[in-house]
Image: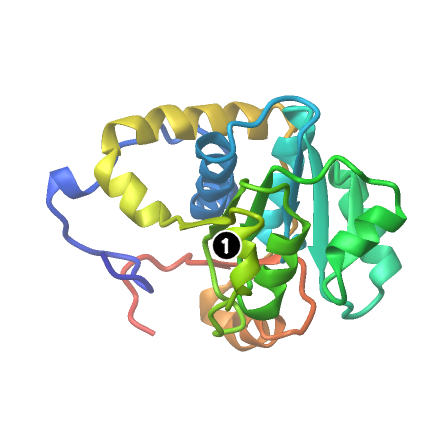
Amino acid sequence: MGTWRSLAVWREKQVLKIPTDLMPIEYCAMMRELCLAYRLLEDHGSLKPGDAVILNAANSTVGQVVIQLCSLLKLRAIAVVREVGDFEKNSTWLKSLGAFDVLPDSGSLKQELDKRKFFAKPRLGLDAVGGMSAVRLADALMDGCPLVVYGCMTGRAPTFPWHYWVAKNLQVCGFSLRRWMKEKKKRVPTMMESLAKLVNADKLRVNYTEYELATEFDEALDHALEEGRSTKILIKVNDIGVTY
């Protein structure tokens, strides 16, 4: 439907009407990330309390929400992040959100979990990175459990060794929130209301930094390109209808 707009004309059937007080407008702006995290856990893995979920890019907005939802659902989230910046600080922060453990995205995640005596292997893997990071997640999974690919930050598709398919019975599937919302549009308002209740009850929160489009765009762009960034960049448009 396009982006970078403050005004547009659409057919009524193309849009959803939601209450203005559904949740803070900043969180409405992050609705894609909130809904994506919700669906990844709701639709995959047939999880039950006590099960483990392993995810890479865990400091991303989606990752932050997945970790908090896991905590609410009594699932154990294994957060995997790159060793950029202060790893220990990131680890402490992710654990404060509810992560059961935090691992660097390198080496063998399976061996690292074994060293930490984490013998109940994850039953769901969530990949937003691709490449070797996805392979590391797959290696750590319990045999026959799904790896859900929903992003590819590296731009490199993962290539799995043949024995992952044969011996581990690896199950890999992709997930597109856009397609889900298009096919199940009637279920979207209920999902949004469920998320709004959690946000409004302060059980779900996301790090974000807000910038004004007319005066702070360059600063926002520099911040967005920062390596290891763990805050969502929001652009606020005050002058509705103005062309920049």
* Residue nearest the observer in this picture, 215 or 196: 196
Whether residue 73 is visible: yes
Residue 103, placed above or below residue 144: below
Residue 191, placed above or below residue 9: above
**Mark 1 surroundings: few (<14), some (14-19) or many (≥20) residues within 10 A:** some
| Residue in the image at 31% along x and 48% along y | 178
| Residue in the image at 88% along x and 41% along y | 117
Q: Where is residue 100 shown, x and y percent of the image?
A: 78, 38
**SS for tag 1?**
helix
Q: Quadrant of the C terminus?
A: bottom left
Q: In the shown orientation, is residue 229 left or right of residue 236? A: right
Residue of label 1? 165
* Residue nearest the observer in this picture, 72 or 224: 72
Color scheme of the displayed model: rainbow
Residue 220, placed above or below residue 170: below
Q: Where is residue 12 shown, x and y percent of the image?
A: 13, 39
